[in-house]
Amino acid sequence: MLKLTFAAGLLSAGMALAQIPTLTVYAPDYFTSEWGPGPSIEAKFEETCDCDLVFSAGELLPRLVLEGESTSADVVIGLNTDITKKARELEIFAPHNQDNGRLTLPIDWNDEIFLPFNWSYASFVFDTTKIKLPSSFEELANLPGESKIVIQDPRSSISGLALVLWIKKIYGDDAGEYWQKLAPKILTVTKGWSEAYGLFTDGEAEGVLSFTTSPAYHIAVEEDKTKQAAIFREGHYPFFELAAKVKSSNNDALSSMFMKFILSDEFQDLIPMTNWSYPSSQARKKWPSVFSDLPMPKSTVYFSEIEASEITKQAIEEWRNALSQ
Amino acid sequence: MAQRTFSIAANCILLFAVFGPLVVLIFHADQNFTFTTADRAALEFTLLQASLSSLLSVLLAWPLALALSRRQFKGRRLLIVTLGVPFILPVIVAILGLLSVFGNSGLLNSLLIFFGFPVFSVYGLLGVLLAHIFFNIPLATRAFLLALERRPTELDRLADGLNLNFLIRFWILDWPIIRLIAPQIFSLIFVLCLTSFAVVLTLGGGPKATTLELAIYQSFRFELDFGRAAFLAFIQLSIAALTCALSIIIFGLPLNFNRGLDRPIHKRYLGLGAFFWDFSIIIVIGLFLTTPLISVLLKGVQNFYLLDATIFTPIFNSITLALFSALISTILAMGFMNKWGEVVGTLSIAVSPLIIGAGLFLMVRNFINPFEVTFWVILTVNSIMGLPFAIRIVRPASDEIISNFRRLSIAYGMAPYAWFYWVYLPRLKSALTYSMGLIAALSMGDLGVIVLFGGADFETLPLVIYQLMSAYRVEQSMASAVILVLISIGIFLIFDRLGKTRNA
Amino acid sequence: MLKLNFSFEKNYLVISTNISLESNKIYAVVGPSGAGKSTFLNLISGFTEISRGYILWNEHKISDLPPSKRNISFLFQDNNLFPHLSVWRNLALAVSHWPKISIDDEAKLHSVISEVGIQGLERRKPSQLSGGQQSRVALARVLLQENKILLLDEPFAALGPSLKDQMLELIEKIAKKKGLLVLMVTHDPADANKIASQTIVVKNNKVHPPLKTEKALDPINGPLADYL
């Protein structure tokens, strides 16, 4: 009698296990780390999906390109706008089938393939105990005394690229000239955001290229209000992080469920305090107060995907020339 | 005979794992052999900073090694071990540490301001060189030290007996050794600096300080142009190969000499002038190398309370990875125990881990998906990265043992197994353990291929440090870095102790 | 009877010979610097391969055998012992390559140890011995190998004159007792005079047939007159 029950138990457990589908999500390292949004998102999704969400970390696009059709990814999350054009050309993604109208972004979003899950604005963050916040690019180029900023390299960093495009959009053909004016104020150029921000928090530079949402961390976690983002008159360049469904996945039901989940309040609620950016599909009044209280740029400047692809090479060259004097 | 087979096998493994990926990548993707003016500039700068860095490292290392070899003092052992630490630090931690001392708001400038001197900016070529010699002087010093210590103590006694003065001793005893080892060290450091990227950029102050590695990174990750990335990597590799080959052709290969009877290190009798010279060097260079490290340690230690139990898994993973890499590297190194083996082994670090990772993937994907066996991939790459060091340490010892005792073993009629058991391995033990300790320590801090393959299923300490930084948690990051450093030093010391029971 | 009929060329060294040597005799090997005395010994022992010819020991061809199978023992100029192993182990390796040795072998070791006079030193390592003691241990090893031919390449050069003489006497005693054929390279005519009845001169690319020692070392009319 016991043996039979035992066997039956094992069998049903086995069947149950076999029945729980897995959703494989590719994400960047910072996303899946325990200090990133990954763990909370996984927990929340698994509450209702009856599935096992598995993250796989690594360099997203190169990996997808290498894996090709045989990729085990169902969904990819954490892509940035700089590679959407290339990614699109690879034809590895499927339409997300979500209502773009639900997005609360500063620009109109029409992309059927890439779905933003959070966003922020590029901006310079300063240590206000050492320096007064500049309110325009002109003032930035005329920072008092020996004050310096740290920026990232547009060739190796998304935020660095955002800055180059931002300046290009505002100054157009005079972008190169502006960079020359700004050059003396730049302490150094780093490979990625982490190094730059590390230099800033260490006090090496008074300002750093970061996001308008960065101060939220310091206020919320460190109770430090001295690090603030400078809001420029000219407007700011937005920065989106995206998710997409993988075409070759055979987990369509689950992936669609996940994409829908992204726009839901359950997901969006998690974003601000784990990824330190603005939720992509939530009205401002629903944000945590530390975010809604942050100063917001009055206007947005932006290159569409096509425009960006045409102008990027030239913009980077101008930057490189100006700084290599 | 067995040695030869093993040698060939080892070389094949290397070819497969390092050069294979490169070749595969070049032929797989659309070939893109464009080489822009920006690339030219990058190449020129790469060569410039690599050669200068190596030259300076070597020039500064040998007086230090000389000084250390002549003096015995408390904490000498610890100093030598500590010297090696900067090399294993994750790059970002090392950069912050360096800047906390040499940066605009660093210790040095604070002192200068205090005394009314003008502020000195480290950003630029100077910064790059500074950072590189910071990482590499310890390496070079240790290599010189090893060679100097290998000299039979009988020669020193002889010099004492003849009452040779400081300068003559140097010329006759020390200089020949230095002259022979220097080119090798130069090549190794050159290759290391060749692939340096984040450090160069940040401390270089801007795009003028761009290296080929940046271009490779950009092509690979941003433009998804694997063909071009591989092409540039190939250029990088060729430069490395050329340099190594040149240094061998010009300077020849190091000989081995030594017929000492294992007597312990000998206290020498040198004049007072030498005493001051030696200790000044030790103090100055020692300070330069240890202050940034101490700064990092201080910053980290005061944030220890921020760490929690989640750090144990990465610690365990890192240690496991480190130990296995060390073992494999050292064993593999035994297959490169000849002149060209050393060159080939060195070249293994000239190929960007991104390339190796991607190429490896392409090579094995029909059999297995490397992304599912992250641990093994990282292990492979780490072991290969450790090769040059293992070879450099084990080979001289191996040559020495063979040249001294092979004949005697033949006289005893020893079969290979007996030779290994009674003579070769016992005498090689200290070199083997030293090599393992060093590589284990190096492997602890290596980020390498994990950049491509990620670590959701296999988190290591360096990855955790990076993740913390990305999440604004700089202090926690520093604290984790300190843990990394302490463990690495610990591992190294343990292995060192294991090997110490060598002879009389 | 050791028949040597071979020639050797490598780099700038050329040696050829066609001589016969008898057992139970001690031969000194002398000649100007660089003539190839050590090489000659290496060729006989097998550490260096001959270019052409053969070596016969009691009518058996030994020139294609490895050194340890030629019935030859040798004492080098240095590195005669393994510094990291104890005296006991250094000797034990001469009879067995396994960590444990049989009772018989142990007895053999003890007997040889007392024969050369190094009792009480078994546990020591070579670096803890004096030059003379080290030489004796090396000699003990040779005894254990029980080969009939003994080649010496100036193994006692680093010892002082009186110690050297002692060792030479010991060699002579052992050689007589075991009926060995000894070939001894030396730079010092006194050594040759002391224990070698015959002397082999190596000169002008040739290894000459043995002469009576006094004749070979004759400073006026001998083959080495120019050098002595």
Image (tube, rainbow, N blue to C red):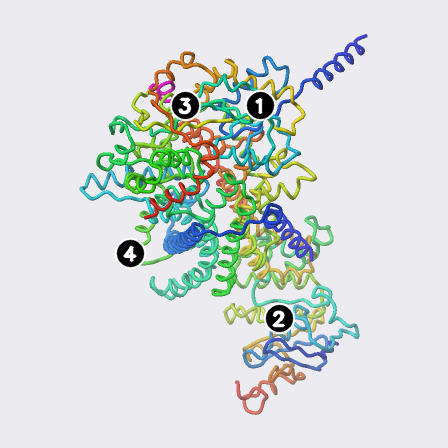
In this view, the mark in front (2 or 1): 1
Horizontally, residue A64 falls left or right of residue B161, namely right
Q: Which mark is residue A292?
A: none
For label 2, the residue is C152
In this view, the mark in front (2 or 4): 4
Identify the subunit bearing mark 1.
Answer: A
Labels 4 and 3 in the same subunit: yes
In this view, the mark in front (2 or 3): 3
Q: Percent x, y for residue B226?
A: 56, 44
- Name the residue type under label 3: Tyr
Mark 2: few/some/many CA within 10 Å (<14, 14-19, 20+): many
The answer to which of A150 and B193 lies nearer the viewer is A150
For label 3, the residue is B305
Q: Which mark is residue B272?
A: 4
- Name the residue type under label 1: His
Identify the subunit bearing mark 2.
Answer: C
In this view, the mark in front (1 or 4): 1
The answer to which of C184 and B417 lies nearer the viewer is B417
